[in-house]
Image (tube, helix red, strand yellow):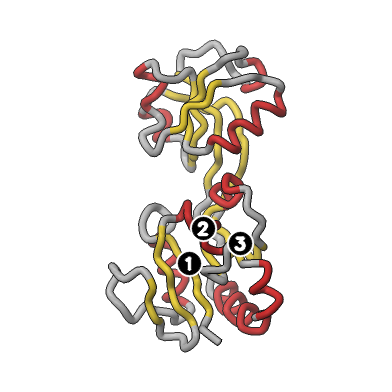
Amino acid sequence: MRGLILAVPNKGRLRGPTMELLERANIRPLDDDRIYLSNTTLEGVQLLSIRAADIPIYVYYGIADLGITGKDVVAESGLEVYELADTGFGDCNLVVAVKSDSKYWDPSVLPQGTKVATEFPNLTKQFFNDLGIQVEIITLRGAVEIAPILGLADCVVDLSSTGRTLERNGLRAIGTILRSTAKLICNKVAYKTRHEQIKMLENLLVRNK
């Protein structure tokens, strides 16, 4: 039987804290940072370094047994995986934000047909459907905050931890869709068939968070 594979972000805001957590648990990659699948100092555990947004996919299909990624990413994927533990880092909110001079102060009063720029089309659609507001979703992959200023969108749905990035781009939050932290997630089948190994790794990470 192969060892456990733990998927971790290969870059972005969660990469540093994830690797620090592993370091505290004495789990260090033995291969170069550019190697996607690396052996580690913990026998029987390998690290798979991929995009944070892809981690739920690899875990759901059983390529990775476990993964560390944001709750926002897991929710956006819509894939059924177990959330075993909160890592204690990556705290942020998925918010609806409008231009600072906008007359709107709550998402529920945004007009029908509002254009919304976001990296989270599924969560955005669900949120506005629940409000009974038909919106036009414009899916972007980065630099979402600039969309209202350039006239591409009326508002954005984006991650915010302090609000400073929104403020610097002339935006303000008017509602929160989701609070997110980095989660340790697990494949459902692996949790049953490799329970002892998975609990060992989970306990090791939780003790050192």
Q: Secondary structure at mark 2?
A: strand
Q: Are marks 1 and 2 in contact (CB under 8 Å)?
A: yes
Q: Disc 2 marks which amino acid?
A: Thr
Question: In which quarter of the view is residue 141 placed?
Answer: top left
Decide which of tag 1 and tag 3 comes sooner along the chain: 1
The answer to whether 90 is drawn above or below residue 177 in the figure is below
Q: Position of residue 56 (x, y in %)?
A: 55, 57
How far apart are the two marked residues, 1 and 3, measured between alpha carbons?
A: 15 Å
Q: Residue at x 62, y 41 (%)?
A: 178
Circle 1: element type = strand
The Cα–Cα distance between marks 1 and 2, rounded to whole angstroms, is: 9 Å
Looking at the image, residue 160 sits to the left or right of residue 178; the answer is left
> Which label sits on residue 69?
2
Quarter placement of the N terminus: bottom right
Return the disc, 1 or 2, that comes first in the chain's sequence.
1
Please tell me the numbered disc located at residue 7.
Answer: 1
